[in-house]
Amino acid sequence: MRRTLLVLALLLGGCVNQLAQREAFLSQFVGKPDSVLVQQLGVPTRSFTTNGVQYLAYTESRVDIIPGMPAYPYAWGAPFWGWYGGGFPPQVVNLTCETTFAVTGGIVRSFTLRGNACG
């Protein structure tokens, strides 16, 4: 039980660390001209302007496959044998992260992250 909790804590710690690293990287663009943002990250996936605020969105996506688990054989002695459980098939998981920057007056003011792969 303790080993399971330790592994879980390490995994969650890794996610928090990745999120902190992503936020630290993106924070460097706040206060800089939007041209620097486009030079570093490329052309945004989409953009929208409303009430004098331009929003530039960058979308990342990937597909992960979680391996399945086979059925386990069991034996009670001949001739009684079979398969224990049915196993689990692999699962396909779509992961996305959208980073949206708010730009006013040509200067990046803030950013937000949304999705299940942001950290």
Image (spheres, helix red, strand yellow):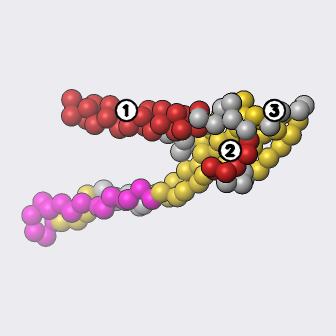
Pointer 3 with pointer 1, Cβ within 8 A: no
Q: Is 84 or 80 nearer to us in this picture?
A: 84
Q: Which label sits on residue 13?
A: 1
Let me know if residue 66 is in the magenta part: yes
Secondary element at tag 2: helix
Pointer 2 with pointer 1, Cβ within 8 A: no
- Residue at (62% x, 49% y) in the render: 40
Circle 3: is it few (<14), some (14-19), or many (20+) Cα within 10 Å? some
Let me know if residue 112 is in the magenta part: no
Secondary element at tag 3: strand
Residue topped by disc 2 = 36
Secondary element at tag 1: helix
Above or below, 92 relative to 50: below
Q: Which label sits on residue 104?
A: 3
Camera-side mark, 3 or 1? 3
Write down the quadrant of residue 11 in the picture: top left
Q: Is any atom of residue 59 visible in this view? A: no
- Mark 2 or mark 1, earlier in chain: 1
Which residue type carries mark 2? Val
Span shown in magenta: 65-80
- Mark 3 or mark 2, earlier in chain: 2
Q: Is 83 or 89 nearer to us in this picture?
A: 89
